[in-house]
Image (spheres, rainbow, N blue to C red):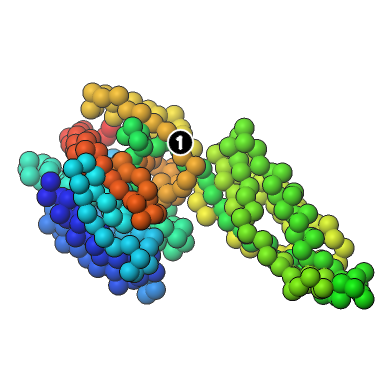
Amino acid sequence: MDYLCDLKSIVEINSYTKNKVGVDKVGEIFDTWFKELGFNVKIYKRELIGSHRHYTSKHDGNSKKLLLLGHLDTVFPPQKFEDYHEDTNWVYGPGVCDMKGGNIVALQALRELKQENIEIKNIDVLLVSDEETGSDDSKLLTAELAKGYDYCFVYEAAGENLELVTGRKGVGTFFIEVQGKAAHAGNSYTQGYDANLEASYKLQELVKLTDLQKGTTVNVGKIEGGIGANTISPYANMTFELRYKVADERDRVLSSIDTIVNHSYVKGTLSKLRGGIQRDVMQTTEESLALVRNIENITSTSIKTEERGGVSDANIVSSVGVVTLDGFGPFGDGDHTIDERASKESFSSRIELSKQLFTHFIKNSNF
């Protein structure tokens, strides 16, 4: 398992999203590894975050094309969690499952093709640097590049039973700024416009938009405002999140949000809305389910699938019409905590799965 040594080498480099030096250092190591496999490297340089990296193989003109998608960044700032260790069954450390481990799975499967003298073609790799903070910089690049591909495999962690992911909720993050008018709560109570009270009405209306049967949730996760107990609140700020499983629900809630923001429940208050959809929904489709069936036929195995409430860059690629499956990485848990770990056995099975699929794709120019 030499690939675990490679995993150790990149896990021990801090690649917190805002640590540009660390993220780029990990990216440069992947540059070397992919160049050794014959890939061309295109770097999309960034000043404040790590640069994004697109690795391209030889393309046959009329063949279908497959994109392998991952990210270089992790969530812990320097000196917070940088240790790598392992025992008989598990490897531990930041990114072992989310998702340096997934990147290693894709890399190792390609390496094994090279070792068997199989020419790698029509398979490209995109590694972005800011997925953990919402892909705000990379999402336009990912969407544009993805339009040139027929299929996308995303190497986020597998499910506990090695499920592949066919669907992920869409997510949006929003901010409401409520402007009121300060007044002395004792002497001039009626002269004030209570921004806190306005926010409380809006909070209740926003939460009513939740429809659990349809998989839609609206969560007001943060609310703050006011000066003190003896002052009518002149301002309030709210932060809330929308998650949804289908596009119709997105449109319903967005329209209702506008109505809630533009209506003043407390006379004299004014409100402004910021934010928007961060990643659109990745819906399970007939095409993605057909691809799962084809994978079962290619590998002669039964493939379990699942939908997840969390998002990934699979949402971005799926939203531009590319047939997308996620969860090709190793199984792990504790991601985004100091207990993050990944199963050694799942590395082996995931590498073998990818190797079989890559081999079939190269030989048949399709799945």
Residue at 78% across / 54% down in the picture?
201
Residue 366 sits above or below residue 48 on the image: above
Residue at 24% across / 44% down in the picture?
90
Residue at 69% across / 47% down in the picture?
207
Q: Horizontal and vertical percent for residue 59?
A: 22, 48
- Mark 1 nearby-residue class (10 Å; few <14, some 14–19, many ≥20): some
Q: Horizontal and vertical percent for residue 228?
A: 76, 73
Is 156 left or right of 236, judged from the image as shown? left
Residue of label 1: 307
Q: Horizontal and vertical percent for residue 116?
A: 7, 41
Is 257 left or right of 104, judged from the image as shown? right
Between 102 and 196, the one nearer to me in the picture: 196
Between 159 and 37, the one nearer to me in the picture: 159
Residue at 29% across / 69% down in the picture?
22
Q: Horizontal and vertical percent for residue 35?
A: 15, 59
Residue 76 sits above or below residue 279 on the image: below
Is any part of residue 69 visible from this angle? Answer: no
Three-letter code for the amino acid on which mark 1 is drawn = Glu
Is 187 left or right of 123, judged from the image as shown? right
Q: Quadrant of residue 21?
A: bottom left
Between 87 and 304, the one nearer to me in the picture: 87
- Circle count: 1
- Image quarter hosting the C terminus: top left
